[in-house]
Image (spheres, rainbow, N blue to C red):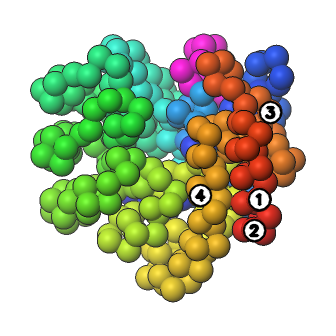
Amino acid sequence: MTKLHGAYTAMITPMFSNGDIDYEGFRKNVLFQLEQGIDGLLPLGTSGETPTLDEDEEQKLLEIIFPLVKEFNAKNGRDVKIMVGAGSNNTRDAVRYCQRAKEFGADFALVVTPYYNKPSDEGLYRHFEAVSKVGVPIVVYNIQGRTGKNISTSLLQRIAKLPNIAGVKEASGNINQMMEVIEKIKLENPDFSVMSGDDGLTLPLMAAGGDGIISVVTNMIPGLMSELAHLCEKGDFAGARKIHYRLQPFFRAAFVDGNPTCIKYAMNVKGIPAGSVRLPLSEPTDSAKKIIEDAIKSCEL
């Protein structure tokens, strides 16, 4: 199974002011990411507003990204990976989305903790057992703030023993839990990857033995975040710290009034296709916009 590491972008979905998808803007963003040296791309994640997309729209986005990445890799001798968001609180749908990812040739499928219905640990285990049988490498997405349920390390240990479980996107916000996952799972199985789901925790997690970042801010600054992750992989934590502290204000600003509302506003400021968000999301407040603009200036982005 392919080892998951480095910097991946949880891609936004560009939209026009009427809420329609800007497919040409999406194509431009994919090319921008590839040219800036990103290691992998994640379409149809939470940052892509997938809860508000219909399956025809999702299909079109996948039909754009896969040929572009394949052509880029062939021309440039690269191996940029594609991880497809495949989560649902309906296990049957999650299995179907994983099958779609596999049919497209995805390197990984990202499967979030089922949200709202808050299953027991046994129900959650069986959910991941079902998607693991599809055959595409699965990345478990732990984000209690959005799902209402944390995946404990003991439960993740059970899940990690299932076939085709490649690693975890850890967005619990708890660095102690992240280190416990490294201690109790990754140290026993080095092929299991521990990826940060929080941009600001990339450096500490990788210093503790983590493998990389599935990032929001890379929608705008893929080159800088890729460099930070690659420096960490090389053990150059002094160099990584310089980038980390340069970007700290932007890490905070990118989530000051929700995601992907803030990163989309920042991208619009920089002229990168992003546009509006769909309800129930709405554009950042004026005070949030000022924080974002100030962070862009202070970080020299």
Could you tell which of marks 4 and 2 lies nearer the N-terminus?
4
106 with respect to 294 (left or right): left
Q: Earlier in the sequence, mark 4 or mark 3?
A: 4
Query: Magenta part of the protein: which range?
Result: 50-62
Residues at marks 4 and 2, CA–CA distance in whole angstroms:
12 Å
Residue at screen point 66% across, 18% down? 279
Does residue 55 show up magenta in the picture? yes
Residue indicated by mark 2: 298
- Return the residue nearer the eye: 252 or 96: 252
Q: Are marks 2 and 1 in contact (CB under 8 Å)?
A: yes
Q: Mark 1 highlights which residue? A: 294
Q: Which residue is disc 3 drawn over?
A: 275
Closer to the camera: disc 4 or disc 3? 4
Amino acid at circle 2? Ser
Relative to residue 108, is residue 34 drawn left or right?
right
Residue lying farthest to the right in this orientation: 271
In the rendering, which numbered label is found on residue 251?
4
Judging from the image, what secondary structure is the residue with disc 1 in? helix
